[in-house]
Amino acid sequence: MDLFDNIGPLDYRYYGRNEKEFEKLKPFLSENARINYQLKVELALIKTLAKRGICSDDVVKEVEEAVKKVTAKEVYEEEDRIRHDIRSLANSIRNKVSDKAKPFVHFTSTSFDIVNTAEALRFKEFSEVLIETMKELEKTLIEMARREKDTVQIGRTHGQHGDPITFGFAIAEYVSRFGNCIKKVKDANLVGKFSGAVGAYNASSLFFDDPEEFEKEILGELGLKPATHSTQITEPEYTLDFIHSIVSGFGVIANLADDMRNLQRSEIAEIGEAFEAKQVGSSTMPHKRNPINFENVKSMWKQFMPRINTVYMDQISEHQRDLTNSASSRFIPELLAGFYLSIKRLNKTMAKMSVDKDNLQKNFDINKEMVLAEAIYIILAAHNHPDAHEYVRELTLESQKTGKPPRELLNEDPDMKQFLDKFTDKQKEIINSPEKYIGIASEKTVKVCNFWEKELKL
Amino acid sequence: MDLFDNIGPLDYRYYGRNEKEFEKLKPFLSENARINYQLKVELALIKTLAKRGICSDDVVKEVEEAVKKVTAKEVYEEEDRIRHDIRSLANSIRNKVSDKAKPFVHFTSTSFDIVNTAEALRFKEFSEVLIETMKELEKTLIEMARREKDTVQIGRTHGQHGDPITFGFAIAEYVSRFGNCIKKVKDANLVGKFSGAVGAYNASSLFFDDPEEFEKEILGELGLKPATHSTQITEPEYTLDFIHSIVSGFGVIANLADDMRNLQRSEIAEIGEAFEAKQVGSSTMPHKRNPINFENVKSMWKQFMPRINTVYMDQISEHQRDLTNSASSRFIPELLAGFYLSIKRLNKTMAKMSVDKDNLQKNFDINKEMVLAEAIYIILAAHNHPDAHEYVRELTLESQKTGKPPRELLNEDPDMKQFLDKFTDKQKEIINSPEKYIGIASEKTVKVCNFWEKELKL
Amino acid sequence: MDLFDNIGPLDYRYYGRNEKEFEKLKPFLSENARINYQLKVELALIKTLAKRGICSDDVVKEVEEAVKKVTAKEVYEEEDRIRHDIRSLANSIRNKVSDKAKPFVHFTSTSFDIVNTAEALRFKEFSEVLIETMKELEKTLIEMARREKDTVQIGRTHGQHGDPITFGFAIAEYVSRFGNCIKKVKDANLVGKFSGAVGAYNASSLFFDDPEEFEKEILGELGLKPATHSTQITEPEYTLDFIHSIVSGFGVIANLADDMRNLQRSEIAEIGEAFEAKQVGSSTMPHKRNPINFENVKSMWKQFMPRINTVYMDQISEHQRDLTNSASSRFIPELLAGFYLSIKRLNKTMAKMSVDKDNLQKNFDINKEMVLAEAIYIILAAHNHPDAHEYVRELTLESQKTGKPPRELLNEDPDMKQFLDKFTDKQKEIINSPEKYIGIASEKTVKVCNFWEKELKL
Amino acid sequence: MDLFDNIGPLDYRYYGRNEKEFEKLKPFLSENARINYQLKVELALIKTLAKRGICSDDVVKEVEEAVKKVTAKEVYEEEDRIRHDIRSLANSIRNKVSDKAKPFVHFTSTSFDIVNTAEALRFKEFSEVLIETMKELEKTLIEMARREKDTVQIGRTHGQHGDPITFGFAIAEYVSRFGNCIKKVKDANLVGKFSGAVGAYNASSLFFDDPEEFEKEILGELGLKPATHSTQITEPEYTLDFIHSIVSGFGVIANLADDMRNLQRSEIAEIGEAFEAKQVGSSTMPHKRNPINFENVKSMWKQFMPRINTVYMDQISEHQRDLTNSASSRFIPELLAGFYLSIKRLNKTMAKMSVDKDNLQKNFDINKEMVLAEAIYIILAAHNHPDAHEYVRELTLESQKTGKPPRELLNEDPDMKQFLDKFTDKQKEIINSPEKYIGIASEKTVKVCNFWEKELKL
């Protein structure tokens, strides 16, 4: 197949062409992976049967050899014939073993014992790759936060200059939020099942007095646990919670990308995406340096976030199950790949991003006198000015009219002397040096970084 | 590339393996198609330049030959080098023409003049394929509606038996709703643009006094019209409305699939998906006949419907454009393919579906006496019974207790004689033969079918 | 009831406290309105019955008087008793008329004949109010676009300075997009129905040979038309398309609000929300002037846009209807109110918004030399420079290094003389005066304004 | 205000008219509640200031008295004047205290210190009410599951009869899934903040060396903890995770309601909503018994589920915050109320729901011979039949043709004798008594009920 005959952008563009990521994701998220994991589950079943003496160790060996040889292509060809995917999988194994072994393939299990368990397993194992990748971004952010912990930046609320912070502190926000997301992904509880066609262990209880034990043993072979209850499928909330952890993490990196994108605006220009020597910024405006990687991350979020609606809708499955969640849940790997690739891209971009201290200073200077307004108001209030907020509000209006800094107007106001006399040294210092009015931005940055390094064992 | 190394189910399963549909969709929805359409737009630009005497006809010929040879692979390799997709496209053409022709390639245009116009064009041309496919389903439905126009079926509201209809009438609902959807897709207004990097025709007005005319001429070459205004991009609502027409059509077929799925329930069994000789219904329950195709259509709807949220979010693009709608909009072909494939599947399934008249009758018989309750109540009211609804409500409770049909209780009630005497013959006939209480179900069915056949020229 | 005991912000905050808007919306969107419209539909039925001679004109008069007196409170009290909303409505009328008139109330109709028709009617009539309000915003935008048609502004793509435009041109984008939205709302096709409990006119055909005519007559009384087919309900796509027109219009104003919000950033400051004398910007930062109204519009969009998912889900209704769309569709008036109130707020804000020409100029100046890069590249290309884009890209890199404007570097480059000699006067003028490189921004602005004034008869 | 002048269905219909629920929800979810909680937070601040010696205990007493008297009405009137909600709140308190106390009101805090903390607190306290309500439903389900643990029901997958279960087992699914949801709501981590306008404790660090301790003390007064990092707002993921727990719980009850709705279908009729003596089923079909409460729950889910998209979008807030999440987040109480009311309704409906054992048996009998197919196939396989699945598949086709049960065909097949001889007694018993082929449905039901009773201390 020609890669560019594909319809899906992940396949032809973001994953399929990126050799390194292709090799990383293929073992978990491709259709070959899906089938490989199903084969692993079928094998775990056989092993358990042998442990229980239902079949011999020879059967295990036969099946072990067989599953190595089964290919997606052959399973699909069998499906073309019989129109049932998991029966085709079973047949593909059966065709490779002796008549003696045949009956034990897929023994007592229903399709979704295999499918659900295999999905839980591959998502769980993929999670480990994902978490490593998330940690890489977390480390990049921590490094940047530490490096810029004392770099004064004007804080912004409503897009307006507010109180000062440091750029490291701004990054620490994402260290913390993304740290929490990593924890959520780590805490994901993906479970399997071997409870049969309607969840009541109908078939397995024909042979075992303890079918729930039997289920636990099979899943134990794979490092999984069973759901607290299942029908034909595991309770959908396990997958949903996992996807929620993914989508909420996606929201965090989209916010980070958005912030950087805005800080790169021509008029702000506090940071910039690195630009390669041969890179073209625009097909007609050669001077442009566009935040294309930040834009890409936001855009991928817009594509993938709404897909959680599918998972919320798939919570509803009639009785012991209807199959309207079958095709839809096949698309989950796309969401995982989209998130993974966006983290990778963002990490690379953040690691090379330039921070422009001149522009940080320049922007800070615009309103440095005005941002002290808050400090003045509060200190006045602390010294018992009965209406400090209103007083300062008028002070700033006056300042806008006259061009004089509020602190000068304050100093010149004879009514204020009684209050100014009470100001502590630290208070005096701050209302005369706006860049010191950063609260505990630096200390908090360090604290957040330390916390997450320890929490996540980075 | 191994097909099964793909992540996207459309690519490896629903489109990529279905040879017939693959050939049908590839020319419009693959990445090769995307690039082919962009080449068409670049060529239309050159042709217009030649018509205006900016370049010679030889340049047109050169470019015409060049675009035939450009491949997606080569454009992507150039993009690896310079990191700009449309500049890479332009370079790929330029590399194949003489120095004389080079300057005119992409002349005065911005990337999104090409991208937006090419997308509008391929979606528009794909629409024609889509509409043909929609019409095929419409024809299947019309045929079924006509065939079953007199087949009495119990009408259902709240999942409860209500007034009788015919099965053809039930299908006519979808003839009508899907007919309206076909009209919406036909009415889609997909537009192009050649107004440059910010929409003000900055570049083209350096050479032309009538840059809007120039834009119209290029688009005219392609059978397109310009937007009423554009920035770097066309107004996003054109695409949004088109996608809305797709997604609302998807909702209609999902509803149809859902209805059929429910009518196939073991206890209802009024219809059934055809089953192939070798088909396996369940990996462990060999007797099962599952509505897998109807389930698939519903499931695909659950996957694709939420994606319109991306398009609603992509309405918001900052100033003359930010690029957070770039990656996200690359996924639109998936939605189109998902809809197309679901229609195809549903059409095939409906065409072979069996209708079980015995079960239709059996279900109708369950409540046939009770469903006359409405008729009785209304006729009584028409003959001036002052509280007919309440009277009949109590009649039905009595009937449930005694097992006697309401009409017998009615006939036995001496207080009712004064009303019964006034009943017309038709009214008497109907309250004694529930299967005649179908209103104008048959006539309406025919009318709906006739209307849509004419409206859509089927 | 205490207003602040409400849970819904619309009720206690945005609608309920705004006396003017309260009076405007109450007649259409409140629960009292809902019931009033249902009463109108019941009356239209009676009138049609009288025209057909089924009941006398006296009955019409009785019902006419009765419906004036029915209150929501009384209908709800009846519903408490009998647990059926429309039966309660009918009973509330019946309780106010003579025994002679009683049987004709609600005669032959099913609940949703009343509910669907009443909803279509009130949404249609509300649309007129909505369209007037939309037109007011459109007029404000046109006025601003005309006024600022020549005010040069730097165009922005990716948040980066691109080609110049005018501020009027930037506003013209919204004149055009919102104009298209107004048209969509005007074209909304809201239909009623009187086809009975399952859509087959079962009850009405007991009395009329032409039940579809009967339906048309009732709806005609109200200025409505019937759906092409109905079950217990009208085809859901009529409402869906209407809501789509609302939500896509909401996206347009959200984008406008977002653009203004960004232009009000401290570093950009090209526009500003007007600020009232007593207004407090921040509880602790008295100097701040926050774009709270623009933020509110964006925020309301975030609240209401996702609700269209409910309407897409409500397309699916089993068989002749299930009632899982009943409670959900009761919330539609909230969406309409949210949109209306956001337009009102935006209009008021835009009308008073200040445009800061100094800052527009200041921002323009930052990159005025660089933005000519595009013009230079294209003119060079037109004069047969074989690799103009790459040449100019390097020129801009050189310019960034040396601080010299690209045009100076160009003029100094001896290799370029051959090309420069061929530049036309207009071309020379533009590459030496960036503020003239605005294409046809002014003319296009006027053209767009003229077009929409005429199209919408403003 | 007339209740029916409201626009929001919650206000005028589901909450506002339901006296009992109104009193239950008002203290947490109304606007009065919102303001009361904000007052609590302002008071906690004052108390902490006093503990630290910043103000006297008299100030605490003054503010304590003041907050008792502040009304929503007065705060809103102040907001009309100064256009800032939290400043209005502060002013409303200040107006009620002495000049001495005035400066300490709202001291060092920013609006969202109050708003975020108050929201966390009221949602947390409301959670306790919610959890009690969830537990009531859980108890109802457990009771039903236990009662019906041995009631045989045909299991259904794809809407088709599959293996048998018991009705109690079907309910146990929801005991388990809803149990997990209760746990998630209990585990919600709602946090407050007192870190000032941009999160760096700028103002509070003017007075305290340990501003984070100061924050902890205030929040400690309220039983809350601070976020690991905050800007002007707490990290949005805390609220998002809470809402996710709500929405995923909503999905579970929607699924339960949907299952019951389907089991109430006329043809299935295994369960039924209780019906009151005076209740009207349909305005025209008096005999109907509609599952209106189950439908309502599903419908409310359709209304409220999509609203989580707003919360996902609200994750993105620019820099130290933009306010586009302000209006949108005001609607969260609606979602909480919608969930609460749906649980209440469902609990009431489930508690009175009738279970029709005759119909359960009747439906079971339809396919009782066929459902043994799975058992036969597996036992044959276990006894080394090399192609048992295919053999049984053909057996069922034969059975459908001849009308003979598969087990009879099996017994008559001479080739099968060798296998039948090996069947254990239990195996023989089961293939001759389908109602015993229920696996461990009963035991599992009890186990699930026991587990959740203990886990949730019911």
Image (cartoon, coloured by chain):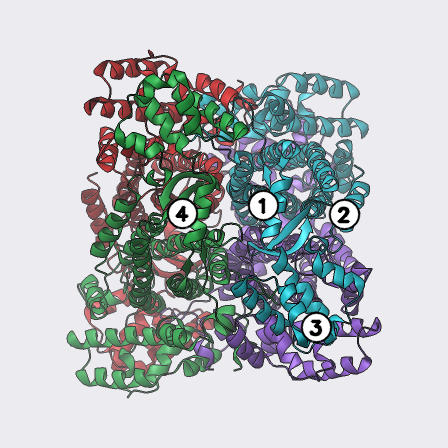
Chain colours: A red, B cyan, C purple, D green
Secondary structure beneath dot 4 equals: helix
* Residue nearest the viewer, comparing C413 with A424: A424
Q: Which mark is residue B435?
A: none
Tag 3: residue type?
Answer: Glu
User: Which residue position holds label 3?
Assistant: C42
**Residue found at x 41% / y 29%:** D407
Position in image of residue A405 (x %, y %): 38, 68
Tag 4: residue type?
Answer: Gly
Label 4, label 1: how many angstroms apart (C-alpha)? 37 Å
Q: Nearer the viewer, mark 2 or mark 4?
A: 2
Can the viewer see residue A106?
A: no
Tag 2: residue type?
Answer: Val
User: Which residue position holds label 2?
Assistant: B448
Query: Do marks 3 and 1 both belong to one polypeptide chain?
Result: no
Assess disc 1: are there few (<14), some (14-19) or many (≥20) residues with their C-alpha within 10 Å of its C-alpha: some
Are circles 2 and 3 on residues that touch, CB within 8 Å? no
Label 2, label 3: how many angstroms apart (C-alpha)? 27 Å
Please indicate whether residue D407 sits to the left or right of residue B200 in the image.
Answer: left
Query: Do marks 4 and 1 both belong to one polypeptide chain?
Result: no
Label 3, label 1: how many angstroms apart (C-alpha)? 32 Å
Pointer 1 chain: B
Can the viewer see residue D301?
A: yes
Q: Nearer the viewer, mark 4 or mark 1?
A: 1
